[in-house]
Image: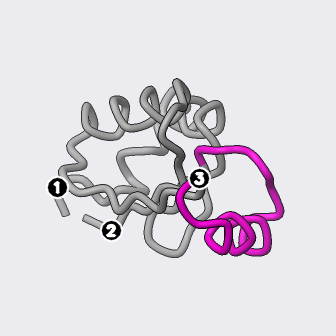
């Protein structure tokens, strides 16, 4: 399974929903980068993704986007293949 990285912050309902969805799809390890604890991480996230909101999710080198993007990918059937579940 590819590495999952999620830019997050302490109080974030969408981050929690994204984490629940990823875990339901078999992801055991999520590297969380907490942008509310380190302003430098927030700036890095914005440079890397072009977005200001959390969560911002990477699976391997692929930027999935936020929770809505993740959920849409899952509904379209693409999340499992991107995660390489079972491979």
| Membership of 52 in magenta stretch | yes
Sooner in the amino-acid sequence: mark 1 or mark 2: 2
Q: Residues within 10 Å of mark 2 (few under 14, many from 20)?
A: some
Q: Which residues are magenta?
A: 36-55
Q: Position of residue 48 (x, y in %)?
A: 72, 73
Residue of label 3 = 36
Residue drawn 64% across the image and 38% down it = 69
Sooner in the amino-acid sequence: mark 3 or mark 2: 2
Residue drawn 37% across the image and 31% down it = 21
Residue drawn 32% across the image and 68% down it = 2
Query: Which secondary structure, mark 2?
Result: loop
35 or 15: nearer the eye? 35
Sooner in the amino-acid sequence: mark 1 or mark 3: 3
**If the image is split into quadrants, where does the C terminus sit?**
bottom left
- Image mark for residue 32: none
Q: Position of residue 7 (x, y in %)?
A: 54, 56
7 or 68: nearer the eye? 7
Q: How many marks?
A: 3
- Image mark for residue 2: 2
Residue of label 1 = 86
**9 lies above or below 37:** above
**How far apart are the two marked residues, 1 and 2, measured between alpha carbons?**
11 Å
Query: Which secondary structure, mark 3?
Result: loop
């Amino acid at each position: 399974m590819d590495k999952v990285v999620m830019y997050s912050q302490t109080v974030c309902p969408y981050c929690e929903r994204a984490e629940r969805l990823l875990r339901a799809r078999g992801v055991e390890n999520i590297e969380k980068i907490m942008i509310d604890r380190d302003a430098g991480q927030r700036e890095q996230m914005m440079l890397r993704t072009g977005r200001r909101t959390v969560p911002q999710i990477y699976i391997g080198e692929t930027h999935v986007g936020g929770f809505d993007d993740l959920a849409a990918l899952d509904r379209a059937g693409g999340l499992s293949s991107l995660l390489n579940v079972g491979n």
